[in-house]
Image (tube, rainbow, N blue to C red):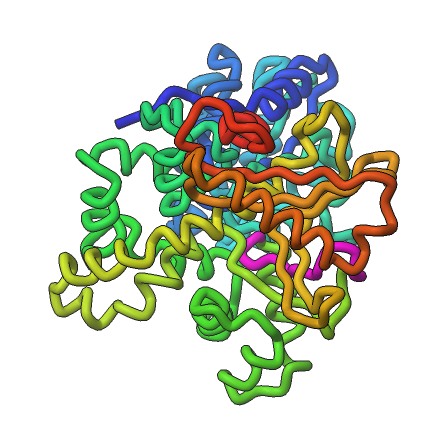
Amino acid sequence: MRLAFLDRENEKARLQRAFGLEDGSFCCVYGRRRCGKSRLLQEVLPRERAVYYAADELEAPLQRAAVAAAMADRVPGMEQVTYPDWASLFQRWWRQAPPRSVLVLDEFPYLARTSPEIPSVLQKLLDQGTSGGKHLVICGSSQRMMQGLVLDATAPLYGRAREILDVKALGMFWLGPALGIARPIEVLEAYAVWGGVPRYWELAAEGASLWESVAELVLDPMGVLHSEPLRLLMDDLRDTVQAASILALVGAGCARLSEIAGRLGKPASSLTRPIQRLIELGLIRRESPFGAPERSAKRTTYAVADPFMAFWFRYVEPNRSRLEAGVVADVAAQIRQSFLRHAATVWEEQARRAFARMHVAEMSWLPAGRWWGPGTDRQPLEVDVVAESTDRRTLFVGEAKLRLQPAEAPRVQQELQDKVRRLPFSGAYERVITAVIPADPGATAIPGVIPPEDVLVACK
């Protein structure tokens, strides 16, 4: 099933503006696999003047022949010549392609691996200043390689891109329209499995239910997504064993660097760089209590950032032997027993992420965080959502919950007020606002409760 093209309005506008330039442009599009980079390009390309080529892992002479065959749609006869090198192929395209033609080299890392000279060849052509208004786009899923090609100051293509687009996963809001789900709690449950990757949504839409899709696509060893996280790691990391081990431990609940290092039998200092790389790739997020320095090592914790990766490393990785043995139904039943705890964690993070885009109490807010530590009574205290107003005079303190029945609301709100009184820093503000943020409020409107629809809209 092919879903309708969703969102990406900003990316589309930037590419269309670049393709409209009379003197040509160079654009770089990169991001995690299956996030819709190729679909984005296909949606925005001016077909009457575009050549689109998706590379693979063939040897260079075969790749050149395939590129030339694609170019022949705009320059007749391109495919009838055997090109001894990439320079001769691209130079002919640069000379003979019609003005404002667009050449897209998708999966560009495959080309660069087999022919490392290609970036330098393209750099020379771009620097000639005689492109005749031609446009060049390179696209790829290896974030490490794509960033190195255009963001590394020593790279041949550095500083030449008109647009550098990092195509990220879509927000939770779009999952409802994609799968035809209306209730926020159901959107959350699906998002807690599939995250924001559009291709996962397309695959999931073919199943009769969420759990049927999970069993067929993720748990079954023959499922399309059964080994997806390992393929993602291979795209960007040389040492996938260490990265997978870190993700497995963090996914299982090891939140502190010292704990991760202890379980791996390594000094904590040796893990700083690999964890930072996982953070840069958007696979792990670093958390510090609200108000604490971001890199305060003493109180820093780590979590798997992507919902699908968190689901996989929490439930699939520890059960891979059982799944290989064919007990998929048993593992699925076990997962469902604790799944709501996983979904609750995802909802808390989404509530924090959305908060700065919402106008709670008709006020604007800075990005929200979580707070944990000893309260004023020296007893452990944890608060799901804490944020300051943009004028820093008002504090918001919120509780994110999966479900909230109207009869429960007064008790939960009183517990929230008790937390405010115990917060060490709440007295520093002129005003403190509290609210409960449920994924399923069980009623259309409850005083002191933020509707889940507000969170979803803010997660576009």
Q: Main secondary structure of the magenta part?
A: loop
In the rendered view, tell whether residue 401 sits above or below residue 296: above
Q: Position of residue 248 (x, y in %)?
A: 43, 69
Along the viewing direction, whichever of 290 and 266 lies nearer the viewer: 290
The part of the image, by quadrant, that contains residue 330 is bottom left
**Side of 160 where 167 appears, left or right:** left
Q: Is residue 387 visible?
A: yes
Measuring 65% from the left and 43% from the top, which residue is drawn there? 121
Measuring 40% from the left and 55% from the top, which residue is drawn there? 341
Residue at the far top: name it: 48
**Side of 44 where 197 appears, left or right:** left
In the rendered view, tell whether residue 441 sits above or below residue 246: above
The part of the image, by quadrant, that contains residue 261 is bottom right
In the rendered view, tell whether residue 173 sits above or below residue 117: above
Q: Quadrant of the N terminus?
A: top left
Q: Quadrant of the C terminus?
A: top right
Q: Let me know if residue 106 is in the magenta part.
A: no
Q: Let me know if residue 287 is in the magenta part.
A: yes
In the rendered view, tell whether residue 261 sits above or below residue 409: below
Q: Is residue 69 visible?
A: no
Magenta-drawn segment: 282-293
The part of the image, by quadrant, that contains residue 372 is bottom right
Q: Position of residue 279 (x, y in %)?
A: 61, 58
Q: How many marks?
A: 0
Q: Position of residue 383 (x, y in %)?
A: 63, 54
Measuring 43% from the left and 69% from the top, which residue is drawn there? 252
Q: Position of residue 24 (x, y in %)?
A: 70, 21
Measuring 69% from the left and 26% from the top, which residue is drawn there? 359
